[in-house]
Amino acid sequence: MLTHSPKNNDQSANLGAQLESPFVNPKEVAVIGKEYERVQKEMDEKLREWEGLQG
């Protein structure tokens, strides 16, 4: 059974907060942004799977 992972939500929120911070190192913005995109895509895929199971 597929379950929604709070871990992905936590990761996404954490990465989003880092990107919004005025103290983030500009060199890290690209790295954090890529990780944010990866986590967001993973969450979207899991949501589509879950919706498919719901019928």
Image (tube, rainbow, N blue to C red):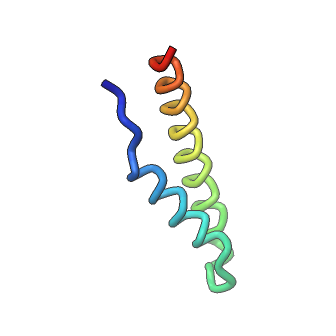
Farthest bottom residue?
23
**Residue drawn where x is 35% and y is 28% of the image:** 2
| Viewer-proximal residue among 52 and 12 | 52
**Residue drawn where x is 64% and y is 69% of the image:** 19
> From the viewer's perspective, is residue 37 above or below residue 23?
above
**Residue drawn where x is 51% and y is 14% of the image:** 55
Q: Position of residue 35 (x, y in %)?
A: 55, 53
Q: Is residue 46 left or right of residue 18?
A: left
Quadrant for the N terminus in the image: top left
Q: Position of residue 28 (x, y in %)?
A: 60, 70
**Residue drawn where x is 48% and y is 32% of the image:** 46
Q: Is residue 41 left or right of residue 53?
A: right
Q: Position of residue 25 (x, y in %)?
A: 62, 79
Q: Position of residue 50 (x, y in %)?
A: 47, 26
| Viewer-proximal residue among 42 and 51 | 51
Count numbered badges in the picture. 0
| Viewer-proximal residue among 44 and 34 | 44
Farthest front residue?
55
Farthest left residue?
1
Q: Is residue 41 left or right of residue 6?
A: right
> From the viewer's perspective, is residue 55 above or below residue 9?
above
